[in-house]
Amino acid sequence: MTPTPPTPRPAALARDVRDRMAAVFSASLSAEAAGVLEVLEQQLATTGEREKWRPLREAIDLLRTILPGFDASVRRHVIARYDAKLSPGENALSKTSVLSLASLSLVADDEVQEEIVVGNATRRLREAVSEELFLVTERLAEVLGTGSLAEDRNPAFPRVFARALLDALAAPGVGMPARFAAFAAFSPALLEAMPATYKAANALLAEHGVLPQLKRSYGTPQAVGSANARTTTAPPPGAAAARDARLFDRMVATARGPGGAASTPAVANAPADAPPATGPEAAGLVTVQVRPELLAALKALDARVPPGQAGEVSLGTVRAAREAMAPSLDTVDALVADLVEALFERLFAGAALTDQAKAQIGRLQIPVLKAALADRALFTDPHHPIRGLIDAMAELGASPDEPRVDGRSPSEWLVAETEALVGTDPSETSAFADARDRLAAIAEKHHDAQAELDEVVAMLREDERRLTAVQDASLEIAHRVGAAHCPAAAASFAYHAWRPVLAHDHRTEGKGGTLWLADLEALEDLLWTLTPRVSEAERLRLATLLPSLRYRMKQGFLRAGLARGEADALMEQMRQIHSELERSPAAAAHGELRLTAGPGASYEDDVTATLNVASRALEDEGLVRGAWFEFTEEDGRKHRCRLNWVSPVQGACVFKDLAAGRSFAIALDELRERREAGRAERVDGPGFAGPSIEAALHEVARERGAEADAVS
């Protein structure tokens, strides 16, 4: 048997991962460097575009210069950027993203082009290694103890490696165009190097027993949608939970009488004659210590009740079981039985639970009684598995039978899980947690499937597609305008004329479709023609390019549905700009371009307004699908709703009120205002079990005269 390697300290293991990834990444690229050099030489020999000759020649010379120490250079730059991510501070190497949507401006040409080059490479790499990246990110977060790693803080994110390669492709006197050409030639090698790099890192972490935290717990929604989203945990138990615990302790002390150990905390999960707990239990662990005579009585109890149907709920089950076990119950056991009976009475008294949920929850009266006699934390722990199970059953029971999940309707899932739990041995405390997690996962799948059919979600999703198309189109134009050096008036024309076409084709085929790529090519040609051209070769190309460009623009206007008059006006405006550029190229180069009709709003202002739609909506990343909120209306009525969909582009959320069976949308700003005013609060689930247990505690306490002392 291979011995398990000793587990190093987190910092040391993080360094080992860094060194392993740097070594594999640099070795993979070095092995392909000679082939990359051949590719560049072939490109230089075959290209007919004169403006590419110099960058390609310089890229070839650059590679020949740096090849002897290329492996060590790449490794050194990966290590430097990895370390900078772990200790960012003011280190410039930690800032792998130069531009942001929230602060986009027309910065230096090389910076804009660098962001485009690295950003495109990062997207390709991320798509190619999404699964490996997810695993190594989760494992690193576990090693570092951060819980999660956002992209901008992730030392293993593809952007880190892309920038490290670009850093290594440098030499004195070599300009950015040559470095970009060399970087582009390494694209196939990058796509081969990244999977090997992540595979090596995951293997190393697995050797040391570091596993990704993939298990979901009900009431702890996971981050969805944006890759920068932060996972949020359920809110901690508040003062009400503490009061309930004190109330239960008071009742236990009263039941034991003057000689009882009144100070024994109920949350210790100990029986009546156990010593006080010396410290808090580990989360999720339950110590089962049941008196032998009680254990025998529990095993003798027949829990195999007939399968329940809607409307068939018997409230005498717990009372009958208590009477059958009376000789084996002490005073505290009798108290627990009374509380379980009161709990189910409360659950079945109202109309919040559907009939099918009541039927299946009712079948769990005996298993819950058994578990409560062995584990009294049910009444004091807000996150007890049985509470979560009841909430999950109530949530799934309120769901329609369509659409089906994994071939079963929600009601069929309820019956199957209930049947598995009936007759549960009191020592099998994990059975309730497992059933809770399974039903919660089924409920999540069902909610996701319903969201696809939800009219409110569909409406907002269509709006989001439109806004995302406008946003992506604006960003593409902004990047290219920044590098084109065309006059401001001409840049504004390109923005206002071509953005509707880009946005339309984005919605039609998606980003990366044939029309989208053709639009970008037309945009680059348009910007080239809107820049002053003085040499004879440039003017010859301009004369050749304009007829084709005019035709493509007219076709784009036609696809985008522009009115004939609007399209003709834009074409006339472009003709005026070209005439002015031809007549006075020097004046146009200095920004003195005269137009009879302006493009309207300022180009820079319009770009900023468009892109800030998303940046404002992303401020509250804690809002994730699956989270639960309790809303308080002005008349005091409360209702709990599940967050089914989040639109960061529009800054809107769609909640589902399960009790009312309706969906509603609310703006992020309004939701924040409600939270600040105390009229919207994060909660840990639909809230059926918790209030019922609280009511049962107070009801039994009043009957036993223990409530007043505990509350005070």
Image: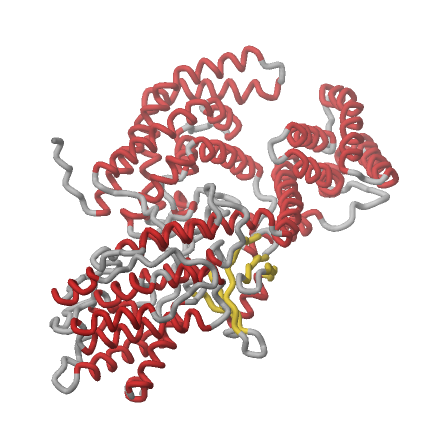
- Nearest the viewer among 178 and 404 is 404
The quarter of the displayed image where residue 339 is located: bottom left
On the image, the x and y values in percent for residue 220 come to: 39, 57
Q: Is residue 421 visible?
A: yes
Which residue: 34% across, 61% down?
364
In the visual, does 531 lie left or right of 566? left
User: Where, quadrant-wise, is the N terminus in this rendering?
Assistant: top left
On the image, the x and y values in percent for residue 444 come to: 46, 51
Q: Is residue 627 visible?
A: no
User: Where, quadrant-wise, is the C terminus in this rendering?
Assistant: bottom left
Badge count = 0
Which residue: 55% across, 62% down?
657
On the image, the x and y values in percent for residue 485 come to: 66, 36
On the image, the x and y values in percent for residue 192 come to: 40, 24
- Nearest the viewer among 346 and 540 is 346
In the visual, does 398 lie left or right of 79? right
In the visual, does 657 lie left or right of 466? left
The quarter of the displayed image where residue 696 is located: bottom left
In the depicted structure, whether residue 31 falls above or below residue 180: above
Which residue: 70% across, 29% down?
522
Which residue: 17% across, 76% down?
330
In the visual, does 366 lie left or right of 126? left
- Nearest the viewer among 474 and 692 is 692
In the depicted structure, whether residue 349 falls above or below residue 583: below
The quarter of the displayed image where residue 568 is located: top right
State the scheme by which the image is colored: secondary structure
